[in-house]
Image: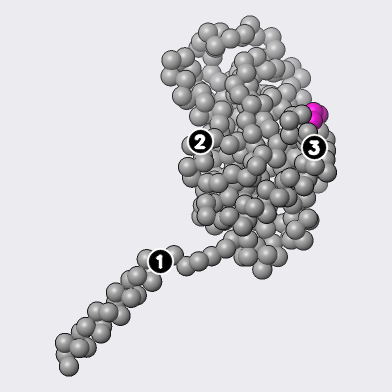
C-alpha cells in the first residue's frame, strides 16, 4: 500500500513538472484582438519620427504609423513611451506588444526579436558643425561624437576599433541633440533627419551630414514565436505601401519619399 501510494505520488509530481516545463500555448494576436487594444513601444523624443506637439500630444512619423495600424485593425492604441535602449526589452518583458520606433533591422537584433518587412528606411550619418573641417574619418581625431545609447549608430561606431573614436553616449536622442545644441559635442552619429534638426534648435550651431554610415531598413519588432501576428503585420505593411499611406506619412515628416524600390 505504501509503495503504491509513493509511486502514485511520484507519478503525479513527474506529471506536474512536465506540465510546468512545457510552455502554455499562447497567441499574442488573439490576446491583442480580445483586449481590443494594441500596446506599441514608441520613442517620442526623436523628432520627426516621434515627438510631442505644442499641446503635449505625441506626433511624428512613427506615431502616425502606429495610429494608422490601430485604426485599421479597429483597436485602441496605447503608446508605451521608450528610449532606444528599452525598445526591445519592452516586448521581451510583455510591457508592449510590438515596436514601431525607428528600429533598424540588424543581425544582432534578429537573434533576439523578429522583424516584419520594412515600412520605412533610415539614412544614418556622422554629422558635424557646418563650420568644421571634418570630411572623413581621420578628421574626427580628438573630437567627441555624440550617440544615443543602444542605437545602431552606437553599435556601428563601437565596432570601429581601428579608428580610435571618442564616443559620448547619451540616454536618448533628445539628450544627444541637447548636447550638440549646447556645444558639448561638435559631431553626432544619427539619422540625417535628426542631424538637420540641431540647427533648427540653435541656428548658431548648424550641423550637416559629413560621413555616411549606412542606410538601414526600419521594421516593426515583435517577440519571437508569433507567426500569426507577423503575417498580419506584413499584410498590413504591404497594403499601406501599395495604397501610398506609409509613403505619405514619411514624406509629411521627413520631407522625402520612401525609396523607389519600396514604392514600385
N-terminal of the pair, mark 1 or mark 2, is: 1
Q: Earlier in the sequence, mark 3 or mark 1?
A: 1
Q: Is the N terminus in the top left, top right, bottom left or bottom right quadrant?
A: bottom left
- Dot 3 surroundings within 10 Å: few (below 14), some, or many (20 or more)? many
Q: Which numbered marker is on residue 214?
A: none
- Which residue carries the number 1 mark? 22
State the residue at coordinates (63%, 65%): 30
The quarter of the rendered structure image containing the C terminus is: top right
User: Residue 53, image x and y in percent?
Assistant: 79, 42
Position of residue 3 relative to residue 74, above or below, is below
The magenta segment: 253-257
* SS under mark 1: loop
**Magenta-colored stretch includes residue 255:** yes
At x 54%, y 35%, the residue is 106
Other residues around mark 1 within 10 Å, as few (<14) / some (14–19) / many (≥20): few
Q: Which residue is mark 3?
A: 247
Q: Residue 97, how many percent across, how many down? A: 61, 55
Q: Secondary structure at mark 2?
A: helix
- The answer to whether residue 81 is left or right of residue 141 is right
| Residue displayed at 22% across by 88% down | 5
* Main secondary structure found in the magenta portion: loop
Q: CA distance from mark 3 to mark 1?
A: 43 Å
Residue 247, horizontal then vertical, whole percent? 79, 37
- The image shows residue 259 at horizontal and vertical percentages of 74, 29
Q: Residues within 10 Å of mark 2 (few under 14, many from 20)?
A: few
Q: Mark 2 = which residue?
A: 107
The image quadrant that residue 32 belongs to is bottom right
Amino acid at each position: 500500500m505504501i509503495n503504491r501510494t509513493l509511486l502514485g505520488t511520484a507519478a503525479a509530481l513527474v506529471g506536474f513538472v512536465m506540465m510546468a516545463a512545457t510552455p502554455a500555448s499562447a497567441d499574442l494576436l488573439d490576446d491583442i484582438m480580445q483586449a481590443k487594444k494594441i500596446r506599441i513601444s514608441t520613442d517620442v523624443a526623436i523628432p520627426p519620427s516621434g515627438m510631442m506637439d505644442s499641446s503635449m500630444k505625441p506626433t511624428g512619423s512613427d506615431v502616425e504609423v502606429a495610429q494608422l495600424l490601430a485604426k485599421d485593425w479597429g483597436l485602441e492604441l496605447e503608446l508605451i513611451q521608450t528610449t532606444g535602449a528599452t525598445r526591445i526589452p519592452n516586448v521581451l518583458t510583455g510591457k508592449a506588444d510590438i515596436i514601431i520606433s525607428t528600429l533598424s533591422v540588424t543581425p544582432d537584433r534578429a537573434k533576439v526579436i523578429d522583424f516584419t518587412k520594412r515600412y520605412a528606411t533610415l539614412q544614418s550619418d556622422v554629422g558635424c558643425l557646418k563650420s568644421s573641417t571634418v570630411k572623413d574619418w581621420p578628421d574626427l581625431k580628438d573630437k567627441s561624437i555624440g550617440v544615443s545609447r543602444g542605437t545602431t549608430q552606437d553599435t556601428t561606431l563601437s565596432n570601429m576599433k581601428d579608428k580610435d573614436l571618442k564616443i559620448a553616449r547619451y540616454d536618448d536622442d533628445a539628450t544627444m541633440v541637447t548636447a550638440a545644441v549646447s556645444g558639448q559635442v561638435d559631431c553626432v552619429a544619427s539619422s540625417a533627419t535628426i542631424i538637420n534638426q540641431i540647427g533648427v534648435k540653435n541656428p548658431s550651431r548648424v550641423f550637416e551630414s559629413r560621413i555616411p554610415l549606412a542606410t538601414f531598413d526600419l521594421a516593426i519588432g515583435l517577440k519571437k514565436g508569433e507567426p500569426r501576428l507577423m503575417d498580419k503585420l506584413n499584410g498590413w505593411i504591404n497594403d499601406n505601401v501599395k495604397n501610398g499611406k506609409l509613403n505619405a506619412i514619411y514624406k509629411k515628416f521627413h520631407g522625402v519619399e520612401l525609396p523607389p524600390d519600396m514604392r514600385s
